[in-house]
Amino acid sequence: QKEVEQDPGPLSVPEGAIVSLNCTYSNSAFQYFMWYRQYSRKGPELLMYTYSSGNKEDGRFTAQVDKSSKYISLFIRDSQPSDSATYLCAMSGKAGANSKLTFGKGITLSVRP
Amino acid sequence: GAVVSQHPSWVICKSGTSVKIECRSLDFQATTMFWYRQFPKQSLMLMATSNEGSKATYEQGVEKDKFLINHASLTLSTLTVTSAHPEDSSFYICSAAVASSYNSPLHFGNGTRLTVT
């Protein structure tokens, strides 16, 4: 079993839809959870950064972490064509300079106008 | 926000030559930088951890003599792909965390696309 599993996609939704992206993991040592957005031929851009379990909201984005189930989610409300990108979940047991991120495989999202 | 700059953004080289990729933290100091590799439609795979003033730590399966890492200052790390071969063609991405913040997330550069002919 891989340490981090992410739905492979791709995912296509109409503009305005609510998007739900998910990852599961097996390593109970993971404490820090991130979602990155990556446009084609660009580096990953940090979207959400959470510590331990709980919810975090930033504009149209909401990140949820359920450590008991080893499950994290990213919700995108009122999706826009500009949200079309690859979304990567990432996690680590430590933060900052000590972090070694383990990434999911990424899911490509397409938002249709 | 923290900005990480990578240069060049793309490079084409001939088989057998060496290529150097630079990673700079523009507005913060980074004692640690990370180098990743990404193949098409694949996730990021950590290659090595670059530590300022000391030797890099390589992940299992990554040849340290082929992928030379130098982290000479708190704002610059370089990755040199030596004697490049076509199978080294990939997207190389660096990341860094703010040294003064123990729980800051990693910020990534925009990557370098290497094509070896």
Image: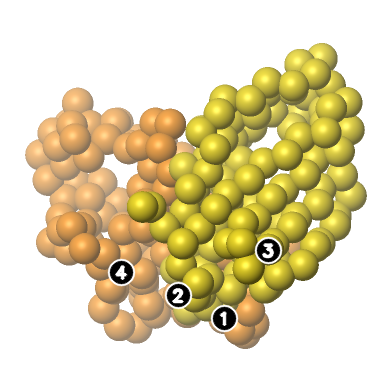
Residues at marks 1 and 4, CA–CA distance in whole angstroms: 17 Å
Decide which of tag 4 and tag 2 comes sooner along the chain.
2
Where is mark 1, residue-wise? B99
Q: What kind of residue is marked 4?
A: Asn
Do callouts 3 and 4 point to residues on the same chain? no
Q: What residue type is labelled 1?
A: Ala
Q: Circle 4 sits in a helix, a strand or a loop, which is it?
A: strand
Secondary structure at badge 3 equals: strand
Q: Mark 3 lies on which chain?
A: A
Q: Are marks 3 and 1 on the same chain?
A: no
Place of residue A71 in the rendered image (x, y in percent of width and height, measured from the top left): 62, 57
Q: In this view, does B36 lie above or below A69?
A: above
Q: Could you say where residue A26 lies in the image, as x and y percent from the top left?
A: 46, 62
In the rendered image, residues at marks 2 and 3 fall on the same chain: no
**Mark 3, mark 4: which one is toward the viewer?**
3
Quick check: do tags 1 and 4 share a chain? yes
What residue sits 54% from the left and 63% below the top? A91
**Do tag 3 and tag 1 residues touch (Cβ < 8 Å)?**
no
How far apart, in angstroms, are the residues tagged by discs 2 and 3? Answer: 29 Å
Label 4 or label 2, whichever lies nearer to me, is 2
Check disc 4: other Cα within 10 Å, few if <14, some if 14-19, many if 20+. some
